[in-house]
Amino acid sequence: MIPTGLKAERRAPDTQGGPVTPESAGDPGAWNTQGAFITPEKKYQAAKVMSASPLELILVMYEQFFALIPDIKASIGKKSQAAMEPDSERAHAIIEELINALDFDIEMSKDLGAIYFYVRDRILEANIRFDPAIWDHIEATMRPLYEGFSEAAKQLAPTAKPGALPSNNPSIVAGMTYGQGKLKEIVVNTKSGLQV
């Protein structure tokens, strides 16, 4: 699961103290099937995630991670463990997702994994010590990685053709026929010889 709309998931009360509604928010949002109000910001985040490349998804996770840190540090400043915990848990979940996305057969993934494991441990330490300086260190550790991924995305963007598949995606897709009530599909990846 990729965390999306982390900030937008909070439901602040309106001026009368009630829940946020389209009328009270003065917002042209909509209600989802679970009855939660969807703001334009949340719609934008969902569209961004749905249309993103794998590299862009990594950048989205980093951006959401960084967006949590000021709130976490503010909660620490207010001495509010209860206010800090949801954001800290989300930050931890983002790091876990970054770890889970790694292919540890690749040397660079092992190096990134070591950094992510280190950051994950620092998040746990920051929660125990309730120390904003640890969050500063966490951000300083993650920022260069974000900048590197961001630069890679910029360099890859001009060469990518809209709708083009990366080289590790299946290169032949055939079948897609219905036979006797079942969908039959064959996918062949010429690099690995994988057939599905």
Image (cartoon, rainbow, N blue to C red):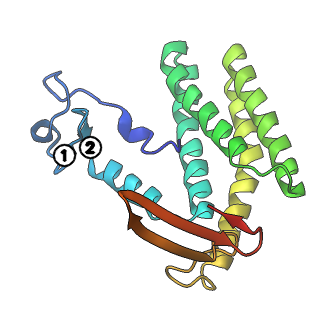
Numbered disc 2: secondary structure: strand
Is 81 displayed left or right of 147 in the figure? left
Q: Up-down: is 68 above or below 41?
A: above
Q: What residue is drawn where x is 80% and y is 35%?
A: 117
Q: Is residue 69 left or right of residue 194?
A: left
Residue 194 visible, this orientation: yes
Q: Position of residue 22 (x, y in %)?
A: 14, 41
Tell me what residue is drawn at x 38 percent, y 65 percent: 178
Number of other residues with Cα within 10 Å of mark 1, as a class: few under 14, some 14 to 19, many 20 or more: some
Between residues 182 and 21, which one lies in front from this camera angle? Answer: 182
Determine which of the numbered discs, if any, sits on residue 30 in the image. Answer: 1
- The residue nearer to you, when weighing 63 against 98, is 98
Q: Which residue is rendered at x = 56% and y = 68% of the image? A: 186
Looking at the rendered structure, the kind of residue marked 1 is Ala
Q: Earlier in the sequence, mark 1 or mark 2?
A: 1
Give the percent coordinates (x, y) of residue 94.
61, 39
Residue 80 visible somewhere in the drawing: no
Quick check: 173 above or below 158? Answer: above
Q: Disc 2 marks which residue?
A: 38
Quarter of image, res 20: top left
Name the secondary structure under disc 1.
Answer: strand
Q: Is residue 119 above or below residue 152?
A: above
Q: Pointers 1 and 2 in contact (CB under 8 A)?
A: yes
Count neighbours of disc 2 (C-alpha within 10 A) and say few if under 14, some if 14 to 19, many if 20 or more.
Answer: some
Image quadrant containing the C terminus: bottom right
User: Which amino acid does the dot numbered 2 rest on?
Assistant: Ile
Residue 64, image x and y in percent?
53, 45
